[in-house]
Image: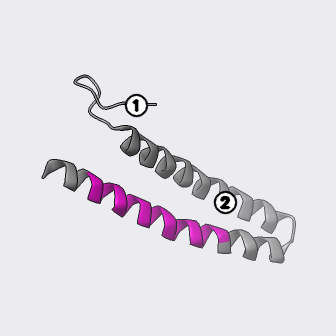
Amino acid sequence: MAQMTATNPISDLMYDWLTVLQVKAEGLNAYERYIQDAADAGSQECVEMFRKIHERDVQMVKEIRDHVYGMIRAEKD
């Protein structure tokens, strides 16, 4: 885990949030593939469920992104 030092300006907490943001963003890309797989399989029910999860995660990514921006601004003050 990253510790904030003279050579590493990212705190453990910031590292954690950046990691969560990355994992969630990668998940959004995966859901897009899963939606296509479900469509190719002719399963509209699965398409709808994957879209629902994708939409929720899009909102969560936006919230996390905004939170990280806030943390960065707070560090500059």
Q: Could you tell me which secondary element the residue under label 2 belongs to?
A: helix
Q: In front here: 66 or 42? A: 66
Q: Residue at x 45, y 44 (%)?
A: 16
> Eyeballing the image, is 76 above or below 64?
above
**N-terminal label among 2 and 1:** 1
Identify which amino acid the numbered label 1 is placed on.
Answer: Ala
Q: Position of residue 54 (x, y in %)?
A: 62, 67
Task: Say which quarter of the image contains residue 42.
Answer: bottom right
Of badges 2 and 1, nearer the viewer stands 1
> Eyeballing the image, is 58 above or below 19?
below
Please give the label number shown on residue 63: none
| In magenta stretch: residue 56 | yes
Identify which amino acid the numbered label 2 is placed on.
Answer: Tyr
Q: Which residue is mark 2?
A: 31
Q: In front here: 20 or 34? A: 20
Q: Which residue is mark 1?
A: 2
Q: Position of residue 7 (x, y in %)?
A: 25, 22
Q: Could you tell me which secondary element the residue under label 1 belongs to?
A: loop
| In magenta stretch: residue 59 | yes
Between the residue at mark 2 and the residue at mark 1, the CA separation in whole angstroms equals 29 Å
Residue with the most extreme left position: 77
Q: Position of residue 26 (x, y in %)?
A: 57, 50
> Eyeballing the image, is 15 above or below 75?
above
Q: Residue at x 33, y 38 (%)?
A: 11
Task: Say which quarter of the image contains residue 12.
Answer: top left
**Left or right: 76 with respect to 54?**
left
Q: Position of residue 47 (x, y in %)?
A: 76, 72
> Eyeballing the image, is 8 above or below 13?
above
Q: Residue at x 15, y 49 (%)?
A: 76
Where does the magenta region start and end? Answer: 53-71
Magenta region, mostly helix, strand or loop? helix
